[in-house]
Amino acid sequence: MSQAEHDKARDKAAKLLRKQGSMSSLNSSDRQDRHHKFETTSTVSYMDEPGHEEHFKPPARFENTYQLEPGRKFPYTVVKNIMQDAMDGYLAEEKYEPELCRSMSKTLSEVIKARVKELMIPRYKIICLVHIGQLGEQSVRISSRCLWDQTSDTYASSEFRNKSLYAVASVFGVYFE
């Protein structure tokens, strides 16, 4: 291969690599050391063409709002209705089976939490708990305890019963300062 053909092939390869979003060091050393010819080619790939930083936007910086009280209160009655509708829809015809109730409590918890988050209550963290058990001749007490601010943090709770099971759902709305 003559030197002209070699240069032409190298230029063609460089154009192809640039089109694919890569930079190549095809102009690296063509040197001869003791009758040996060394050719090196290294390739660096980029997501974007290098040198196009004019579209770079620095990350947004947010200042503290120092808002210590919620702009709107936690909608207790709406959340309670969401819980009751979800439990009525999912558990109305169900019979108590331990494995089914285990997965159903997780599903109900996720559904209720998603519906409450759709209300877009600003700056509230939502915690949802669902307990499902077999209905029999026993009594059950479910309690919770946490540290919170009485003026802004709250919860809603709802109960459900059919012939074979009971369910208790609780949603906690904890204001995030």
Image (cartoon, helix red, strand yellow):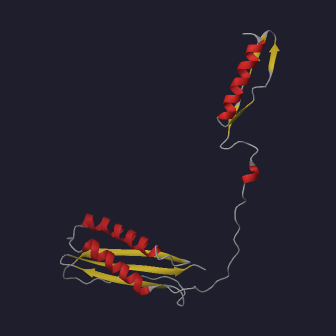
Instruction: Report the residue at 67% width, 82% height from top.
Output: 66
Q: Is residue 110 visible?
A: yes
Nearer to us in this view, 42 or 18: 18
Quadrant of residue 69 within the rendered picture:
bottom right
Relative vertical location of residue 16 with respect to residue 147 in this rendering, above or below: above
Nearer to us in this view, 50 or 131: 50
Q: Is residue 143 visible?
A: no
Where's residue 93, x and y in %?
20, 72
Quadrant showing the C terminus: bottom right
Quadrant showing the N terminus: top right
Where's residue 159, x and y in %?
31, 82
Quadrant of residue 56 within the rendered picture:
bottom right
Instruction: Report the residue at 45% width, 80% height from top.
Output: 172
Relative vertical location of residue 138 with respect to residue 17 in this rendering, above or below: below
Where's residue 145, x and y in %?
45, 83
Instruction: Report the residue at 40% width, 87% height from top.
Output: 77
Instruction: Report the residue at 67% width, 41% height from top.
Output: 46
Number of numbered tags placed on the structure image: 0
Quadrant of residue 113 within the rendered picture:
bottom left
In the rendered view, does 97 fall on the left or right side of 115? left
Where's residue 68, x and y in %?
63, 85
In the rendered view, does 83 fall on the left or right side of 60? left
Extreme residue in the bottom direction: 151
Relative vertical location of residue 141 with respect to residue 134 in this rendering, above or below: below
